[in-house]
Amino acid sequence: MSDTAILINTAVAIVAIVVLIVRFKLNPLIALVVGGCYLGLAAGLGAGGTVDAITTGFGDIMAEIGLLIAFGVLMGAILRDLRAIERLVERLLRVVGPKRIPTAMGLTISTFLQSIYLDVLLVISAPLARGIAPRLGKYGTARMATALAIGLECGIVFTIPGVGALALAGLLNVPLGTYLLYGLIVVIPTVIIATTLMTFVLTRGWWKPELDEQSDAVPSDAPEGDIAAERPDEPGPAGNTDRSGTPGALASGDTTTLTPRRVRTEPLLVVLFAPLVVALLLVGLGAIAEVAEWGNPVVQFLSNPVIALLIGLVGTCLIGRRYMGQPKVEESLGSGLRQSGQILLLSGVGGSLAAVIEAVGLGDILGKYLSASTWAPLVVVWAIAALLHVAVGSVTISAITAAGLLAPVAPSLGLDPVLIALAAGAGSLFLVHLTSNTFWLLQSLLGQTTRGTLKTCSVGVSVASVIAMGPILVLSLVL
């Protein structure tokens, strides 16, 4: 089949996927498989070749990242039920102060909390951000909403073990340690610069509280009590019961016996997050050992991402068992398994589409047109992912599809695959809008109008999308 025919059929497949999702509301999982089937059959792979490519692509990506996604989501589910996020935000507020809390919160969410499923992380962190907003003055809601949107979306695609980051690394065969290191190089300046720039614009008259905030916003005096009630040095629910679940002295009103009856207290934050930190450090150590050509078998085993995240999960389970009890840990794990199911399937069918695209030879064709320089393909990847996100409204789907389209080009250009993965992630952030679940959650949970959410979320994350290409293009000069 001619190159032109393959390009046309690929374009038809991508457009069909978008139409099926947006116009006919077909589940993205089904739409991606249907698009892959069309492309394989139309490009001449035949029935057997098409099915083989789809199933092999699904299996390959699951072998690469399936356990990692599951381990990360399960870890996040336990941390959620341990109130780790609420306590961390309150600690940040104490340490950095109200003026710096938006940037600090955005950085923390984008770099440190990506093991927690996005919607869960948003539902937990948004009320905390809304409670802090009145302390920041007239533009508090705008600043917190922008920082939260940028931190959430950037973390998905740039930070391991974010779902988008894992999928991109798996599709492009990028070692997770490598992706972790370069992803941090991109995400940290991106969040800081984008949040600072948006704060400047919003506080110079662009944000209109009377138009951009809902009239039933939380009163300015309410959050003080809410946040005080969540202070980490206060006893949590577990501190008011004994190990058998019998109400303690606080329930009976006998305050003189409160201290002896408090057999459990909330753990220190460093204890809560220690397993996750250890896991990420092990993955990073593996990347450093690979660069240094240090072939220690113990380091190779422990730094393998599957083993590292397994260690983190086991450690988090033990902490959860100590402070919540085994039944609650099992409940948290069950919730995490339900959350991870759709993520795993979506990542898998993204791998199926990428495998079909590779099988029809699209990589060789695109390589002929993108070999003029090292930065041009990265801009093309960004643009494709951005267009797909505008059409589909899903960061993960657009990043996976764009990476699958351009992944076969990397070998012919001698371009490091991590750059393609990061560029696809950056493009997939462009213009989070009304088709995104994140958009509406940010609107309702932070008390914004649709107009206001378009400013903080749509424009804010789009600014981050563009800014992220700066460090990515700089990396392309040295990799």
Image (cartoon, rainbow, N blue to C red):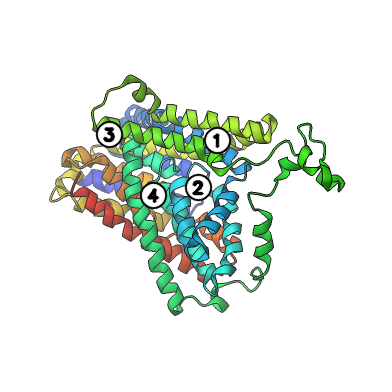
In this view, the mark in front (1 or 2): 1
* Rendering coords of residue 86 (x, y %): 60, 51
- As helix, strand or loop, the secondary structure at mark 4 comes to helix
Amino acid type, mark 1: Leu
Image position of 95 with respect to 301: above or below: below
In this view, the mark in front (4 or 3): 4
* Rendering coords of residue 419 (x, y %): 27, 45
Q: Quadrant of the N terminus?
A: top left
The circle on residue 321 is: none
- As helix, strand or loop, the secondary structure at mark 1 comes to helix
Mark 3 vs mark 2, CA separation in Å: 25 Å
Q: Which residue corresponds to mark 2?
A: 26
- Mark found first going from the N terminus, 2 or 4: 2
- Mark found first going from the N terminus, 4 or 3: 3
**Quadrant of the image occupied by residue 169:** top left
The circle on residue 398 is: 4
* Rendering coords of residue 400 (x, y %): 37, 44
Mark 4 vs mark 3, CA separation in Å: 20 Å
